Amino acid sequence: MSRLRRMPPRQTRRRSYDQYCAAARALDAVGDRWTLLVVRELLGGPRRYTDLHADLPGVSTDVLASRLKDMERDGLATRRRLPPPSAASVYELTERGRGLLPVLAALSDWGAPELVERRPTDAVRAHWFAIPLLRALQAPGRVAVVEVRLDEGVFHLRLGDGAPSPYGDGPADAPDVRLTLDTDTRTALAAGALTLAEGVSAGQIKVEGDAALLGV
């Protein structure tokens, strides 16, 4: 008979704080590193795995795959196959996942003062500024598709129309308004240090299209 002792099964890491608290329950689902940034990307609409990996510089393929799997299990995201002729699969947020938009908006507001200076190691994508600018441009009753042109690239916002995706990467098909602004102006606008009207009046923001839709 073998003298080797049978090793106990390896225990998997628990993902719960085991606290009967709403904040703890929320962090059980989205508190892992990278999860909220994956949500940020998917708020722009369905994305392929390769697109997500490209726009999340620094995340490993294993970690990204693990986070997506966790998000599917927790009901935050789903994966579906695109119809022919495409053979790709995309990930998209569920209604519960889209409900994290106010959370990311609040985090963006809280973190805006840290954008005073860009560090040499900082990656950047234009659409990362969509959520803070959405907060800056949104207003009761305001409905418009706004294309935003920054030094880093182009994205578009969907204001007030109840669309599942509040923003999209790249130009809009038929924007109502187009805004062009530089890096410093974008940062000031997103941080609340500058209003849209002030930026337009000072010549820091170029507006094309129906400016009245944005109240300027």
Image (cartoon, rainbow, N blue to C red):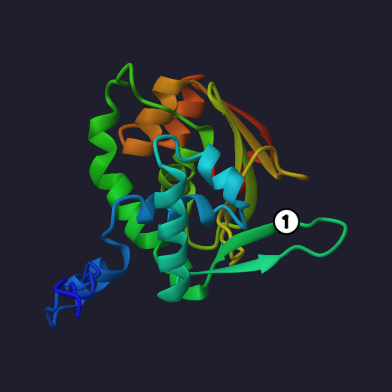
**Percent position (x, y) of residue 73?**
43, 75
Q: Quadrant of the C terminus?
A: top right
In the visual, does 131 lie left or right of 79? left
**Percent position (x, y) of residue 89?**
68, 60
Considering every residue shown, the one lying at the far top of the view is: 120
Foreground residue, 11 or 121?
11
Q: Quadrant of residue 171?
A: top right
| Residue at x-position 36% and y-position 55% | 36
Q: Secondary structure at mark 1?
A: loop
Vertical comparison of 212 with 32: above or below: above
In the visual, does 29 lie left or right of 216? left
Mark 1, other Cα within 10 Å: few <14 / some 14–19 / many ≥20: few
Residue 157 appears in the rendering: no
**Percent position (x, y) of residue 145?**
65, 49
Q: Quadrant of residue 75?
A: bottom left
Identify the amino acid type marked 1: Ala
Considering every residue shown, the one lying at the far right of the view is: 85
Vertical comparison of 162 with 201: above or below: below
Considering every residue shown, the one lying at the far bottom of the view is: 20
Foreground residue, 29 or 146?
29
Q: Which residue is disc 1 drawn over?
A: 88
